Image (cartoon, rainbow, N blue to C red):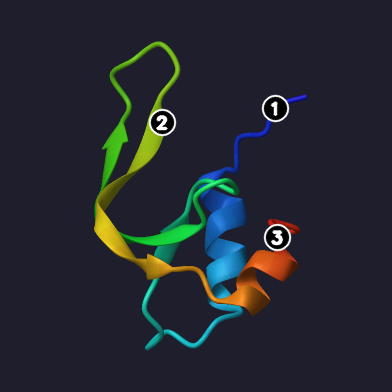
């Protein structure tokens, strides 16, 4: 089973959020920091196309409530 999130699934999840909120990446439970998003790159020329979310630097420590929601204690 793939862990890959599809573009459609991501859009549906984001549509439930306030469109004015900032978006961050949370990438590592052992080093729980939020990261800025620089841009998105979509590649369709490859055998299996993909969309990449490009990280743009650290934004600070994830809030405890986010770590708890992700079970990253």
Q: Which mark is residue 50?
A: 2
Can the viewer see residue 37? Answer: no
Residue that appears at 29% across and 49% down? 55
Pick the front one: 67 or 46: 67
The local crowd at label 3, few if under 14, some if 14 to 19, many if 20 or more residues have their Cα within 10 Å, is few
Give the left or right position of residue 21, taking residue 36 as reference: right
Give percent across and percent down for residue 28.
53, 46
Circle 3 sits on which residue? 70
User: At x 36% / y 78%, what residue is drawn?
Assistant: 22
- Which badge, 1 or 2, is on the more N-terminal residue? 1
Residue 35 falls left or right of residue 11: left
- Outermost residue toward the top? 47
Which residue occupies 55% across, 81% down?
17
Label whose residue precedes the other's in the sequence (2 or 3) = 2
Q: Quadrant of the C terminus?
A: bottom right
Query: In whole angstroms, how far apart are the C-alphas of marks 2 and 3?
Result: 25 Å
Q: Disc 1 to disc 3, how far (Cα)?
A: 19 Å
Q: With respect to residue 5, does 24 lie above or below?
A: below
Q: Please state which of the two labelled residues, at mark 2 or mark 3, is closer to the viewer.
A: 3
Residue at disc 1, secondary structure: loop
Q: Left of 56 or right of it: where is 2? A: right
Dot 2: what SS? Answer: strand
In terms of depth relative to the viewer, which is nearer, 12 or 54?
A: 54
Packing grade of label 1 (10 A; few <14, some 14-19, many >=20) is few
Where 18 sits versus 7, above or below?
Answer: below
Labels 2 and 3 touching (C-beta < 8 A)? no
Vertical order, 20 against 6 (above or below): below
């Amino acid at each position: 089973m793939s862990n890959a999130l599809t573009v459609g699934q991501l859009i549906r999840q984001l549509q439930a959020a306030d469109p004015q909120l900032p978006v961050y990446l949370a990438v590592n439970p052992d080093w729980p920091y939020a990261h800025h998003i620089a841009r998105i790159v979509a590649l369709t020329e490859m055998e299996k196309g993909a969309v990449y979310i490009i990280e743009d630097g650290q934004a600070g420590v994830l809030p405890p409530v986010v770590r708890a929601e992700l079970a990253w204690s």
